[in-house]
Amino acid sequence: MYRDAQKSAIKEELQGIVHAVRGAVIDVVFKGMVLQPINSSLIVAYDQPTPLTLEVHSHLDLETLCAVAFQSTAGLSRSVKVYATSAMSSRCPPIWTP
């Protein structure tokens, strides 16, 4: 059920690739596309039993973003496909402003 919910949230047309892996920090390139907003979720579908979930941390330039992994990145390499989702990360509550 969890995987079905994730698959329905994936935007197949918004596909990037892993550019660099530094521990839990992943750089992702989306060539010719608008970058996902900060705090949005990304899914890495690679040869592990469960997909890897990333959260967008910052935009490095017009095509590259920096994301943080929520699970182990063991076995993740460059050029692996990354899919944008329509979901925002729920890891942190929104900041309250009066």
Image (spheres, grey):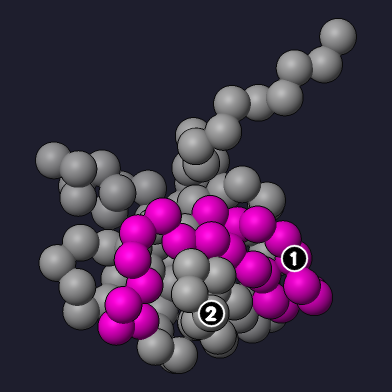
- Quarter of the picture holding the N terminus: top left
Q: Which residue is mark 2?
A: 22
- Quarter of the picture holding the C terminus: top right
| Amino acid type indicated by mark 1 | His
| Amino acid type indicated by mark 2 | Arg
Q: Nearer the viewer, mark 1 or mark 2?
A: 2
Q: Looking at the picture, how far across and down is residue 79, in whole percent? A: 44, 90
**Residue 83, magenta (yes or no):** no
Q: Residue furthest top?
A: 98
Q: Nearer the viewer, residue 74 or 80?
A: 74
Residue depicted at x 44% and y 66%: 83
| 28 sits left or right of 10 in the view | right
**Residue 62, magenta (yes or no):** yes
10 Å crowding of disc 2: few (<14), some (14-19), many (20+):
few
Q: Looking at the picture, how far across and down is residue 51, in whole percent? A: 27, 63
> Of callouts 1 and 2, which one flags the residue occurring earlier in the amino acid sequence?
2
Q: Which residues are magenta?
A: 55-76
Q: Nearer the viewer, residue 9 or 54?
A: 54
Q: Residue furthest front?
A: 23
Residue depicted at x 69% and y 76%: 64
Q: Disc 1 and disc 2: Cα gap in Å?
A: 16 Å
Residue depicted at x 30% and y 71%: 45
